[in-house]
Image: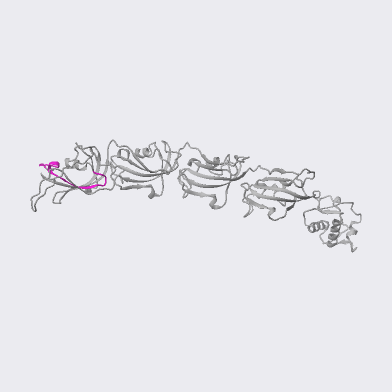
Amino acid sequence: PPPRGFLYLSVLVTFAACNAPPVPLDDILIEKTFVPEQCARAVQVGDYVRYHYIGTFPDGKKFDSSYDRGTTYNVFVGKKQLIEGMDKALVGMCVNERSLVKIPPQLAYGKQGYGTIIPPDAILHFDVLLLDVWNPDDGVQTNTYHTPPVCSRKVEVSDFVRYHYNGTLLDGTLFDSSHTRMRTYDTYVGIGWLIAGMDQGLLGMCVGERRIITMPPSLGYGENGDGSDIPGQASLVFDVVLLDLHNPRDGITVTNQQVPESCTRTSVAGDFVRYHYNGSLLDGTFFDSSYSRNRTYDTYVGQGYVIAGMDEGLIGVCVGEKRTITIPPHLAYGEEGTGSKIPGSAVLVFDVHIIDFHNPADSTVVTVTSKPEECDVHTKKGDFVKYHYNASLMDGTPIDSTYNYGKTYNIVLGANQVVPGMEDGLMDMCVGEKRHLVIPPHLGYGERGVTGEVPGSAVLVFDIELVEMEEGLPEGYMFIWNEDVSPDLFAEMDKNEDKVVEPSEFTDYILQQVNDGKGRLAPGFDPYRIIDNMFSNQDRDGDGKITEAEFKLKADESAAHDEL
């Protein structure tokens, strides 16, 4: 006997002269009018088929049509549920194949015919289009046609997945597509939320994988279909691309860590962190980046200011560290997502680069890198100091350097002429000493930073060298005497002896005392502004001149004034 599935046809070929009477058929005659390029499966005895047909007599008169009834003819093949000729004709056909089948009466309705529809001894012609074939023994068939280069995890029972699909019947008729809705299908796998065939077909998939899942109706929508687009007893074909995968038990995962060699401190809850990130979905779809805004994302960690997964993923990082943080949706934006950029139930992947971090309780960190052997005189509040510095951010980005200008930076300590952290770093220092300063933003330039130079909330790093210092005056004084004060001070100032001291007389006298070494003005300030201030404090009634009654030394004052 021929092998199972092989179409064995006995075709009677008759050579007859013109006008000779037709020779009766001994067996079916098949003329294939359309054969698909690919035939993944041919009908075998015992298979279940769905097909359309038009039945006519040799003269072309139609006696039946499945098209007229609006439904396919569905039947098992080779189980005597059909006329014998059709049973034979269907064996070996492929889905989408179309054939013209001529069946002799002995393989059709014979001498009895069929009521008033088929007369006795009638030859029948059937135009057959095969739409579906399956077997009760069939299970789910999967065919992966794209595998991603990296597959760190595969779908398991109870996982939650997001995927796109095109759903077709076996003949290619589209019945549904997530792409047309522009929204993924999101569901748990293996717990009965899907038809059984899809539950099975999704198992073992990787994110980014594409596969064809084919299932018989017993694992699809069964005998009744879905009542709309899927007919009863239909095989289903799903072209699936898996976009996302997680499990409700998942926590965050940290991968691709690049930790700098020097890491003296790691972040803890309550720290304020500045970092760059690229954010994408699990399939690589980009949704956000701090780089595109040319600004770090700045936030406290461990205090609920960011999504829970990021709060956790930023703990224990070093400045300069890079890491990938993968966050399941229940630790991110949940079932709702954020709208247009992040879909509901999406796993998020952040590639993070830590720029700096600090804690609001931090003070300036001072590290002495070099100190001269003789270091007896130390800086204090009020001293006038000259120093060089190189300034940078924590990630090494340079900000400024006095060496670029070829001159020192000069300030009076305690006069609020620099940020508080620099004041701290310059105290108790000797000439020639070098220090490394790390200044938190609340002792630097704060949340606003310096436009175009220092980002907001940035930790600052200074390498400083004290070049020169001049001792300041006691606190509260802008001028002091280096020797005993003349008892005739007022008279010495009153050059024109008119019993009042004009501003010019006052200024000339003070400058002369400084030049003669008899007095000192506070270093680092404009001497004329100091002297104007001294004069204003002496001019009690504000009339622009000082009388002898108004004139007093600071030592004689009960209240503090920046005056004589």
Q: Quadrant of the C terminus?
A: bottom right
Q: Residue 28's spot in the image, x, y percent? A: 16, 44
Q: Residue 336's spot in the image, x, y percent? A: 46, 45
| The one of 103 and 495 positioned closer to us in this rendering | 103
The question of residue 108 being in magenta is answered with yes
503 shown above or below 154 = below
| The one of 355 and 562 positioned closer to us in this rendering | 355
Q: Residue furthest left?
A: 20
The question of residue 332 being in magenta is answered with no
The answer to whether any part of residue 308 appears in the image is no
Q: Residue furthest right?
A: 487
Colour scheme used in the picture?
one colour
Q: Residue 251's spot in the image, x, y percent? A: 50, 38
The residue that appears at 89% across and 56% down in the rendered structure is 489
Q: Quadrant of the N terminus?
A: top left
Q: Residue 229's spot in the image, x, y percent? A: 31, 46
Find the magenta span and give its range.
93-112
Q: Is residue 125 left or right of residue 478?
A: left
| The one of 231 and 125 positioned closer to us in this rendering | 125
383 shown above or below 223 = below
